[in-house]
Image: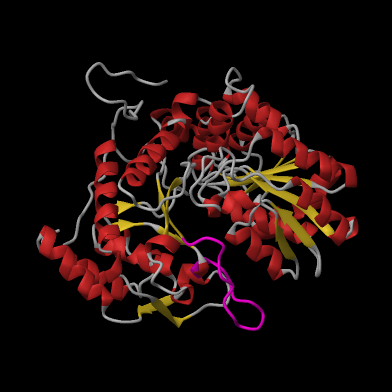
């Protein structure tokens, strides 16, 4: 629903009321600088209590509704045969039209199961674009990834409504080059995370799946950000405006052999699962649940969270619920764009994405400009974002850097968490950092894990630039902020 105003310019409006709050804490700048050094300039290592606006992710930090919390009270706490599981499985079958469900504790657990089942050394998985953990599981098993997102999807500023679309010509050419026997599966990611939460069109999904079906290649949908993608299909794609979110979801699901999701994103609580259309394939994968996750009727999840997810799936089909995130993001993107801050346009789901390649063009890619910008935003405002660039990549086999196609800083908008005034604060501080961007320097590793280094790696600044940036900030805002 779009609320019209009589005297005020149009703004996104929260379609909920706040019933439980959590106190926020804005440390003084000198303390934030010390926290950066304590966390080795890796925002994943910051303590949440030391953060004012936590925009690292929307994974597992979305606000539950009153109905989701109420549902948790009826959880059937059994190791095997919990009625909670059967309620969840029935709900998923109702909305996706797929009858076989494997529970897992979150999305990367699903990726582990799928990779273990499908990927052998030398096999290739074709994607519109990779996600960090999905790629890591594939390469861990000796497979590799081919990313075939359309070239224009990597252009930071554009009006293209579906920048996550896969290039259909490249898809068919890739299958023919690799041979059918060498392609493990086609994976399409809704709300493509690493290029700015950009959606795929329904038509592109349909056409891509048709190509895979022609060659007998299994098709997999990562539905973790599906609710955002549904919103954009309904509002941007021809012929979809009159369809309900439930209809669009079912149309998408009907295309795929397998659908998996992180409940930390889709459903707004902690969990995940794999929906499998074929019974034989389902039974071939169920042993991995008992081996890696838990029993088949909980899969590593808390039954309380499972009850909340069952309600959350239904809420994910409510347009008033799924519209707030994209609308707040679009508002932030437009304001930042009007200020001249390089930002990914059009606004996608998940968060507003800053173009660190442009903002920190003076910082070499080997010194991780997106990582440095992420640290600068925490230093100058207590805002924790997430680096989505070269730091999030893994090195090539010869030890050289694999430079990312884009250097982004994601400012995620967890569902039903932040207000418009808090959004305005973030916009204001981003603008200040942009206007003082020449003070930002680079980072280098002091401890570099081999896999998923952005989670636990330790870094240091290449100069004393954090001190100079903080001095400029405190000259403007005082030492208390």
Q: Position of residue 5 (x, y in %)?
A: 28, 19
Q: Position of residue 8 (x, y in %)?
A: 24, 23
Q: As rendered, which of 260 and 323 lies closer to the eye? A: 323
241 in relation to 416, above or below: above
Q: Quadrant of the C terminus?
A: bottom left
Q: Nearer the viewer, residue 12 or 369?
A: 369
- Reply yes or no: does residue 406 show up in magenta: yes
Q: Is residue 251 left or right of residue 132?
A: right
Quarter of the image for residue 199 reads top right
Q: Quadrant of residue 194?
A: bottom right
User: Which residue is painted at 49% across and 25% down in the image?
Assistant: 319
Residue 396: % across, % down: 64, 77
The magenta region covers: 391-407
Determine the residue positioned at 29% across, 54% down.
Answer: 430
**Does the magenta segment cover residue 172?**
no
- Judge left or right: residue 212 versus residue 254: right
Query: Which of the 4 image quadrants contains residue 142?
Result: bottom right
The image position of residue 184, as x and y in percent, is 81, 57
Q: Nearer the viewer, residue 230 or 408?
A: 408
């Amino acid at each position: 629903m779009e609320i019209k105003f009589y005297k005020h310019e149009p703004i996104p409006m929260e379609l909920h009321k706040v019933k439980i709050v959590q106190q926020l804490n804005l440390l003084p700048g000198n303390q934030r600088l010390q926290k950066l050094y304590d966390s080795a300039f890796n925002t994943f290592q910051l303590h949440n209590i030391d953060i004012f606006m936590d925009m690292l992710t929307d994974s597992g930090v979305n606000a539950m509704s009153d109905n989701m919390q109420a549902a948790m009270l009826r959880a059937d706490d059994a190791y095997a045969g919990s009625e909670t599981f059967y309620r969840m499985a029935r709900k998923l079958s109702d909305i996706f039209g797929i009858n076989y469900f494997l529970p897992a504790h979150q999305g990367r657990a699903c990726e582990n199961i799928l990779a273990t089942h499908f990927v052998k050394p030398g096999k290739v998985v074709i994607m519109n674009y990779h996600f960090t953990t999905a790629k890591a599981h594939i390469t861990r098993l000796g497979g590799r990834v081919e990313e075939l997102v359309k070239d224009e999807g990597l252009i930071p500023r554009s009006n293209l409504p579906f920048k996550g679309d896969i290039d259909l010509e490249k898809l068919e050419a890739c299958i023919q080059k690799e041979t059918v026997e060498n392609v493990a599966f086609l994976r399409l990611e809704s709300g493509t995370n690493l290029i700015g939460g950009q959606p795929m069109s329904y038509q592109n999904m349909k056409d891509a799946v048709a190509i895979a079906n022609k060659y007998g290649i299994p098709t997999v949908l990562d539905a973790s950000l599906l609710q955002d993608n549904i919103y954009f299909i309904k509002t941007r794609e021809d012929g979809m405006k009159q369809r309900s979110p439930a209809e669009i979801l079912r149309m998408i699901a009907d295309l795929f052999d397998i659908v998996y999701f992180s409940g930390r994103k889709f459903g707004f609580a902690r969990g995940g699962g794999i929906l499998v259309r074929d019974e034989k394939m389902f039974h071939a994968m169920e042993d991995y649940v008992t081996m890696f996750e838990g029993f088949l009727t909980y899969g590593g999840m808390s039954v309380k969270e499972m009850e909340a997810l069952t309600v959350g799936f239904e809420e994910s089909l409510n347009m008033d619920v799924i519209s707030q995130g994209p609308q707040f993001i679009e508002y932030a993107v437009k304001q930042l764009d009007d200020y001249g801050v390089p930002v990914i346009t059009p606004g996608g789901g998940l968060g507003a994405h800053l173009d660190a390649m442009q903002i920190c063009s003076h910082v070499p890619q080997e010194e991780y400009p997106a990582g440095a910008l992420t640290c600068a935003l925490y230093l100058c405002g207590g805002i924790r974002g997430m680096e989505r660039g070269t730091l999030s990549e893994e090195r090539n086999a010869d030890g050289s850097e694999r430079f990312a196609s884009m250097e982004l800083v994601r400012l995620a908008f967890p569902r039903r968490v932040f207000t418009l005034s808090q959004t305005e604060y973030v916009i204001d501080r981003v603008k200040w950092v942009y206007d003082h961007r020449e003070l930002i320097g680079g980072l280098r590793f002091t401890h570099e894990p081999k896999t998923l280094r952005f989670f636990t790696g330790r870094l240091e600044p290449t100069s004393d630039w954090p001190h100079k940036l903080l001095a400029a900030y405190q000259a403007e805002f005082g030492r208390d902020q």
